[in-house]
Image (cartoon, grey):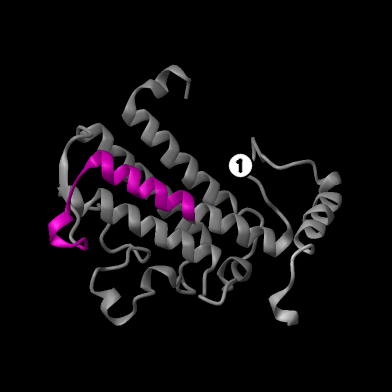
């Protein structure tokens, strides 16, 4: 997309939503089914769980919020609303029978479904978020897009840290890693450690 095209607000939103999605999916590259499913934090966060969660977030906000229906209600990656009553982590738990490739394909279909909202509706279209408090449940497409974009980029950052912990792979994107050269990393880490160690360690008291 050219710089000129980004003068259009809808194009800006679509572009940055797309960057978050691609950054997230990139973090799965080269990993096997076990690696992408293993929980990497005490709260159970996994790389594939993030993908499932983000896809369902986009369906909810760009679908029912604006009276739009997801075209494949029987897909195994779509988490039905009543599933959360029994399991609040339903959209973070990827069943063994749902392979990574299938979930990635689903995620890309969701992206196209979400982006189509910008073709179908003006940014000032007001929708209603069913799970938000009644006094603030109404929101414009513009607000929803910013809300979702913020959430996606937050989770892409989570995935970045998880992937770095798995095999050291890190960076903003394939084309633009946005990291200092690896050859100087050890001295950089040593410098940061030396600064931190000037302060007392509460655990040693």
Classify 54 as above or below 21: below
Classify 112 as above or below 65: above
Q: Which residue is mark 1?
A: 173
In this rendered view, identify the residue nearer to me: 101 or 123. 123
Magenta highlight on residue 100: no
Residue at 29 percent across and 74 percent down: it is 84
How would you rate the neighbour count of disc 1 (Cα within 10 Å): few for under 14, some for 14-19, many for 20 or more? some
Question: Looking at the picture, how far across and down is residue 165, in whole percent?
Answer: 68, 63
Magenta stretch, residue numbers = 131-154
Question: Looking at the picture, how far across and down is residue 3, in whole percent?
Answer: 47, 20
In the image, taking residue 120 as reference, residue 166 lies left or right, namely right
Residue at 48 percent across and 66 percent down: it is 49
Residue 103 in view here: yes
Residue at 19 percent across and 52 percent down: it is 65
Magenta highlight on residue 135: yes
Residue at 56 percent across and 58 percent down: it is 159
């Amino acid at each position: 997309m050219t710089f000129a095209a980004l003068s259009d607000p809808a194009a800006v939103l679509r572009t940055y939503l797309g960057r978050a999605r691609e950054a997230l999916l990139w973090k799965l590259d080269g990993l096997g089914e076990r690696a992408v499913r293993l929980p990497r934090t005490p709260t159970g966060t996994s790389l594939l769980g993030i993908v499932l969660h983000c896809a369902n977030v986009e369906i909810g906000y760009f679908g029912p919020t604006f009276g739009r229906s997801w075209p494949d209600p029987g897909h195994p990656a779509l988490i039905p609303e009543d599933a959360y009553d029994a399991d609040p982590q339903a959209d973070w738990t990827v069943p063994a029978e749902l392979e990574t490739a299938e979930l990635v394909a689903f995620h890309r279909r969701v992206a196209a479904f979400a982006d189509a909202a910008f073709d179908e509706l003006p940014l000032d279209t007001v929708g209603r978020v069913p799970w938000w408090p009644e006094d603030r449940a109404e929101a414009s497409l513009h607000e929803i897009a910013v809300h979702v974009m913020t959430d996606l980029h937050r989770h892409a950052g989570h995935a970045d840290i998880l992937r770095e912990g798995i095999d050291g792979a890190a960076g903003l994107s394939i084309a633009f890693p946005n990291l200092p050269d690896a050859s100087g990393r050890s001295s950089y880490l040593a410098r940061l450690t030396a600064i931190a160690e000037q302060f007392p360690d509460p655990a040693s008291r």
